[in-house]
Image (tube, helix red, strand yellow):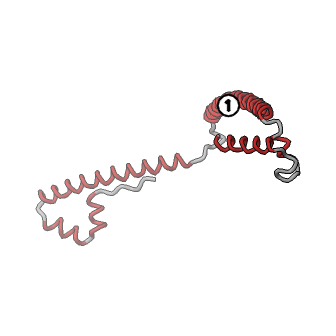
Amino acid sequence: MSKPKKSVVTWLSDAFGISHKIISESLSAEQYAKFLEEAGAVQSSVESDETDEDDEDEDLEDENETPDPKNADPKGSTVEARLSALEKGLATAKNALKSEAKAHKATTAKLTETEQKLKLAEDQKGKLRQAVNPLADEDATTSAKDGEFLTQADIDARESYNRRKAEE
């Protein structure tokens, strides 16, 4: 999409019409030649800028174009390269998932083992508690009023037990 190029003289005539004629007539031949030389330098720099802009526009157009299926690579090398990259990424993700699953399984096994140990410890604690005060659990479940059917020794034992429990 290049524009038609104009010479400096043509451009000045088009742009300044009457003024160009006055300038060319009022300057000496040497001054006018120098003026045209400087204007030519300006014109060439403007043209190079336009050429750079045209190149940038063409680059943008090339990036925005969709590939023509008729001119496409029969192997689809770009698509195949992307597909292989995606397959590699998928394989990496699957390996990471497998390692996470193994770690989860190991953690779950440790958690189960710890829960079993905790249950055994609670059972042991209950047995020891029962050995220290055999009536403690039964007293807690009876519906009798406090102090009813209790001997003085039971009341003293319960108070002593409750004091020790509060201190812990």
Q: Is residue 76 visible?
A: no
Q: Quadrant of residue 96?
A: top right
Left or right: 1 in relation to 149: left
Residue 83 position, x and y percent, is 65, 33
Q: Is residue 167 visible?
A: yes
Left or right: 21 in relation to 132: left
Looking at the image, residue 102 lies above or below residue 150: above
Left or right: 10 in relation to 73: left
Depth check, front residue: 14 or 98: 98
Image quadrant where one finds the C terminus: top right
Looking at the image, residue 91 lies above or below residue 59: above
Q: Residue at the spot x=76%, y=40% of the render?
A: 157
Q: Helix, strand or loop at disc 1? A: helix
Q: Residue at the spot x=64%, y=29% of the render?
A: 92
Farthest residue, direction front: 152
Q: Residue at the spot x=28%, y=55% of the render?
A: 43
Residue 21 position, x and y percent, is 21, 68
Depth check, front residue: 71 or 111: 111
Residue 45 position, x and y percent, is 29, 51
Task: Count all numbered tags in the image, as a single digit.
Answer: 1
Residue 4 position, x and y percent, is 39, 56
Residue that numbered label 1 is attached to? 100
Q: Quadrant of residue 95?
A: top right
Q: Quadrant of residue 23?
A: bottom left
| Amino acid on which the number 1 mark rests in the picture | Glu
Left or right: 31 in relation to 79: left
